[in-house]
Image: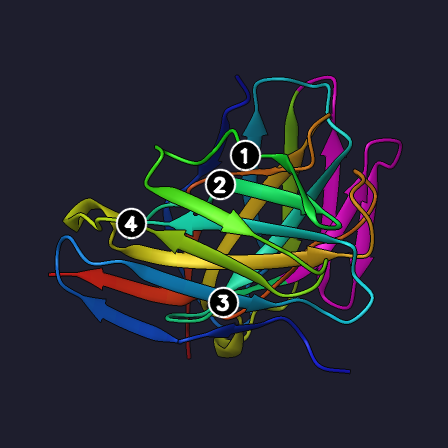
Amino acid sequence: KQEVTQIPAALSVPEGENLVLNCSFTDSAIYNLQWFRQDPGKGLTSLLLIQSSQREQTSGRLNASLDKSSGRSTLYIAASQPGDSATYLCAVIQGAQKLVFGQGTRLTINP
Amino acid sequence: GAGVSQTPSNKVTEKGKYVELRCDPISGHTALYWYRQSLGQGPEFLIYFQGTGAADDSGLPNDRFFAVRPEGSVSTLKIQRTERGDSAVYLCASSLYAGGGSEQYFGPGTRLTVT
């Protein structure tokens, strides 16, 4: 059974810092990995989707990497801003179409 | 275009009652998914539809939960004899097709509280 773990559970950093969020998964047979953002009381917003054949994806200040063989992904956020404060979730998809989520990292950017 | 919409946004019901939660997917999306998110946890898969049929319902916790998508568009998640443990946010997502390369887009969720 696939298990997804995110470390740390919570992170607080000053504005302007670069930061890395970590995601690990136990079964490397995945189709893709997706990073989401969730604001309090809201649904999920997709940030980046990495296909299993890809190593990384970039969108603006966000860069996500994927190492299937080691079962790891990282989300890099450059020049963090208070508006980046949210919970970040990673999820993997396998043969079935369901996403398997980690528990999330709650990020706070302090002005 | 419009995103995934869910109604109601909040539902409070008494233990033992029946509830229906509705999801309107993005127009043209053939695949539809239901997830449940408990406080402080990531979402957990319940069921997904490809067209009108439930392709995988392995995440439904028990037979009190049922979902339909009769015309291949709108879906309804039905919960009978609700229990306090059913309290959670129920999220719906849709994708262009059911495949690992097709991105899932989520609605805002329905917050269900069973008193």
Q: Position of residue B27 (x, y in %)?
A: 78, 71
Task: Kindly report which numbered mark, 4 or 3, lies closer to the viewer in this rendering.
Answer: 4
- Residue B46 disc label: 2
Residue type of the residue flagged with mark 3: Arg
Q: Give neighbour class at mark 2: few <14, some 14-19, many 20+ (Cα, 10 Å).
A: many
Q: Give neighbour class at mark 3: few <14, some 14-19, many 20+ (Cα, 10 Å).
A: many
Label 3 with label 2: CB-CB less than 8 Å:
no
Magenta stretch, residue numbers? A46-70
Q: Nearer the viewer, residue B21 or A40?
A: B21
- Which element carries disc 4, helix, strand or loop? loop
Q: Who comes first in sequence, dot 4 or dot 3?
A: 3
Label 2 vs label 1: CA separation? 6 Å
Label 3 with label 1: CB-CB less than 8 Å:
no
Q: Which residue is mark 1?
A: B57
Q: Give neighbour class at mark 4: few <14, some 14-19, many 20+ (Cα, 10 Å).
A: some
Residue type of the residue flagged with mark 1: Asp
Task: Kindly report which numbered mark, 2 or 1, lies closer to the viewer in this rendering.
Answer: 1
Q: Which residue is mark 4?
A: B80
Q: Is residue A37 above or below residue B10?
A: above
| Left/right of residue A88 with respect to residue A27 in the rendered view | left
Label 2 with label 1: CB-CB less than 8 Å:
yes
The residue depicted at 63 percent of the width and 68 percent of the height is: A79
- Which element carries disc 3, helix, strand or loop? strand
Q: Is residue B30 magenta?
A: no
Which quadrant would the C terminus of chain A be assigned to in this image?
Answer: bottom left
